[in-house]
Image: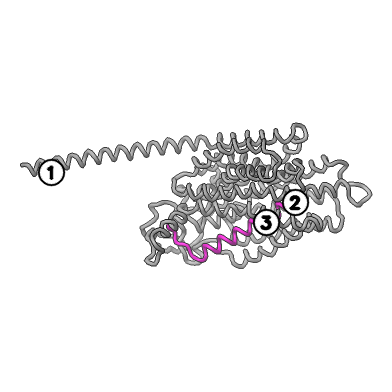
Amino acid sequence: MPRSVVRVRRSSSTDPLSPPTLLARIWHFFTGNERWTSYHISVFFITFFSFAFIHATRKTLSTVKSSMIHVWVVNSSDSSLFPTKQAAEEFLAFLDFGFLVAYAVGLFFGGILGDRYNPRIVLSIGMWLSATTAFFFGFMTEQYHIYNKVLYAILWISGGLFQSVAWPTEVCIMGNWFGHASRGIVMGLWSGCASVGNIIGTIITSQVVPLGYQWAFAVNSSILFFFAFVVFWHLVPAPRLVGLPEPTETPDERNRVIEESSERPKPISFWRAWFLPGVIPFSLSYACLKMVNYGFFFWLPMYLQTLKMSEADADKLSMWYDVGGIISAIVAGAVSDHYKSRTPIVVGMLVCGIFSLWGYSKSPPDFYINGCMLAIAGFFVGGPANMISGAISADLGKAREIRGNAEALSTVTGIVDGTGSVGAALGQLLIPSVELWFGWTFIFYGFIIMLILTIVCILPLFMREVRAWHTARNERNTNSEQEGLLQEDNNYEGNHEHLA
């Protein structure tokens, strides 16, 4: 069956009814002069809050670990589930590890599903199943006093598998709607959905945990379950489904008429996606970086409680790490949109992140000083993590080699985030043992080593892009000099003819 083709004129010119010059320049800075419709706004907010509510549900466990340990070690039954607090902490570490392993495996397959089936349906089903498993894990087991380690493991680990379909399908949808000219700031702002979800989950938990930790799971999972209906009914996965053109990826696509297929491109193979430019280096770097990011995600509240803070205060203070990450992703994304590559910005922020982590490890237990240092660490660690998993993954999935011929965005996102989750899983397995034998100071030193390895993984890309930038600059200078000499020759010949 022949593929239908739509002829679309790309144009970067402004609309006659555009705002005044200053506002137009501001709008151009943030959007790259892309034309946005109500569909763009709807897609942004629906995908943003869908993953925010997923993360809020995921965050619940880390915010109520102390309460669960207390119930498991000293519960109302004749015998406790665990003999000591350390045994309960190790089981929670195993749950975190199992969740992330299942999440990592699911990301590889979830990315493939997003490129082969309707992302809206895949995402909705994943949200419904994730909400159900979280509800049974946290609410039903405690409400009916069902304390069983195998049941806990099955429910929480399967939740990781179900949640894994969300990120690659949502990045795929966002990449379909927003082009390279605005992707940095849009995906920077959008990738804050995880941090916003952490904040939402923390606020809800801090309010309802006095009633019992099970109610935190009940509220967060219920919100996720019902929002899945909004996704199923209202989310539009791609512009072509409503007769709109795809966004531009390169400057030469603007101001010209091109032909676009109204049908979905054929999905790329999983193994070919690995060998797209930049996929392997950024996947390995994200494995190291996500270990640090998720170390804060899962264990920061417990660390703050060792500083003699209450569970509620520790939850509130931990939000500042997410606030720093949100601000960083927006600022760095906006700046990177005006450059061909985002790698130098990521490397510069990671170097600063090394020093910010060292500084935070020396931070006093004062609430405000600690919160300020935590926000700085979130800015330089959480921000690059959001950029790699969001804007950079979308850039890699829209590589020039397959542009317009194959679908790879969801698969590439799944590869990058899946590899990152493998690293994060190993980290969660090691953290409680390192804390037991060496203390929290050595955990922060381990985080610093991981940031160094993150830089090492993408250093070849960084050096290659720096050399390319120097070569391009030298060529521009050479061309300018040649044009200047040519202009001087023309002026000399003109003056000579005039005198003659």
Q: Main secondary structure of the magenta part?
A: helix
- Marks 2 and 1, how far apart in space? 81 Å
Query: Counting residues from the N terminus, which is met first, the one under dot 1 or under dot 3?
Result: 3
Q: Nearer the viewer, mark 2 or mark 1?
A: 2
The answer to which image quadrant residue 494 occupies is top left
Q: Are marks 2 and 1 in contact (CB under 8 Å)?
A: no
Magenta stretch contains residue 48: yes
> What is the three-letter code of the residue carrying label 2?
Ala
**Quick one: quadrant of the C terminus?**
top left
Please, is residue 124 above or below residue 307 in the view?
below
> What is the three-letter code of the residue carrying label 3?
Ile
Tag 3 residue: 200
Tag 2 residue: 312
- Marks 2 and 3, how far apart in space? 14 Å
Query: Counting residues from the N terminus, which is met first, the one under dot 2 or under dot 3?
Result: 3
Q: Residue at x 69, y 60 (%)?
A: 224
Position of residue 405 measured from the top left corner of the image (x, y, whole percent):
47, 53
Tag 1 residue: 494
